[in-house]
Amino acid sequence: MDVNPWHEKKRYALVLAAGKSTRFKSATPKVTYPLCGKSMISHVLDKLEDLHIERTFVVVGPESQSVKDAVASYTVAFVVQEEPLGTGHAVMAAAPLLKDVSGSLLVLCGDAPLITTETLRELLETREVEDADQVVLTATLEDPQGYGRIIRDRQGNVIDIVEERDARPEQRAIREINTGFHCFKISSILEELSQLSPANAAQEYYLTDLLRIFYDRGKKVVTLATDDPDETRGINDLEQLALAERKLKEIGDTS
C-alpha cells in the first residue's frame, strides 16, 4: 500500500495492559503469563518492531511491577491507569504524553499475542493513506457473544460500536465485531477524549464510544476487516492460553 507522503506519518503505539486476571483466578497480571517461552505481552511488543514506531506506551495498573519486569528488555514508556475505569480512561491517562506529537496512534491489546505485524501495518497505512481520523479493525464471527458490535447505516458506513451489555436484541444479532485494535489520528483523538462519558451499563469510559462521537462530528472513520479472527482474540483464561500456545507453534512463532 502506497502511503501519501503529505500525510502525517509519525507513528506511536499504546498497548493496553492494565487488565486484571479475574478468570485466571490469579493476582498475576495476565499479560505476564508465559507463552512459548516469553510473556504474553512480549509477543505483542515484538509485532511492533518493524513498524517504525516512534515511541511505545504501555498502560499498566497501579501495582504493575511484574508487567514492568516482563517488558524490561523493551524500550517503552509506562502510563499508570490508577483506576480500572475502561479503555477510554486508559487512553485519557496517556493523553498528556501525546499532546506535543502528531501522526498516528495505534491502540492495541496486550492480551492478544496472535496479532500479526502485517495486520498492524495495514491498520497504520490505512489511516495514513485514507487520512482517516479513526480506523477500526473488525472481524466477522459465527458466535459474536461477548464482543462489541459494529453498527452501520443503510449505505454501509460505520456509525457506532455498541458493547454487548448495552446492545438491543437486534444489535446482538450482528456478527461483525470490534476486535479492540484501532488506529487514530492523534490530533483527532485528543480533541474528543473529553467527550467520553461513563453513562453505560459498566459505568466505564469506553474507547469505542469515540466512533459515534467522531461520526457525529463529521470526522472520517473507516474499517479494516481481518480474514483471521483468531489473530485478534484476547486471552482470558488458561484454556485460551493453551489454545494460543498451540496456534503459535503451528505457525512457527515461538521465538
Image: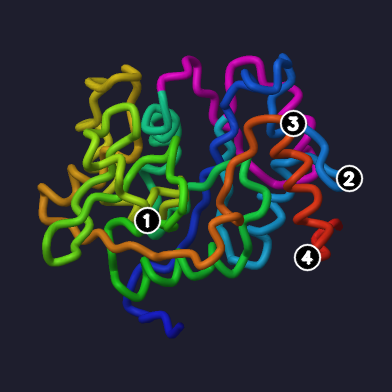
The residue to which callout 2 is attached is: 37
Return the disc, 3 or 4, that comes first in the chain's sequence: 3
Return the disc, 3 or 2, that comes first in the chain's sequence: 2
Tell me: residue 122, above or below residue 45. below
Q: CA distance from mark 3 to mark 1?
A: 28 Å
| x and y percentages locating residue 36 in the rendered image | 85, 47
Q: Secondary structure at mark 1?
A: strand
| x and y percentages locating residue 32 in the rendered image | 75, 32
Q: Amino acid at mark 1?
A: Val
Viewer-nearest residue: 2 or 161 = 161
Q: CA distance from mark 3 to mark 4?
A: 20 Å
The residue to which callout 1 is attached is: 136
Q: Amino acid at mark 3?
A: Leu
Return the disc, 1 or 2, that comes first in the chain's sequence: 2
Asked if marks 4 and 1 touch (Cβ < 8 Å), the reply is no
Quadrant of the frame with the C terminus = bottom right
Q: Amino acid at mark 2?
A: Gly
Colour convention: rainbow
Q: Secondary structure at mark 4?
A: loop
Q: Quadrant of residue 230?
A: bottom right
Answer with left or right where residue 171 lies relative to residue 79: left
Asked if marks 1 and 2 touch (Cβ < 8 Å), the reply is no
In the image, residue 77 lies in the stretch drawn in magenta:
yes
The residue to which callout 4 is attached is: 251
What segment carries the magenta color?
Answer: 60-85
Return the disc, 2 or 4, that comes first in the chain's sequence: 2
Q: Amino acid at mark 4?
A: Ile
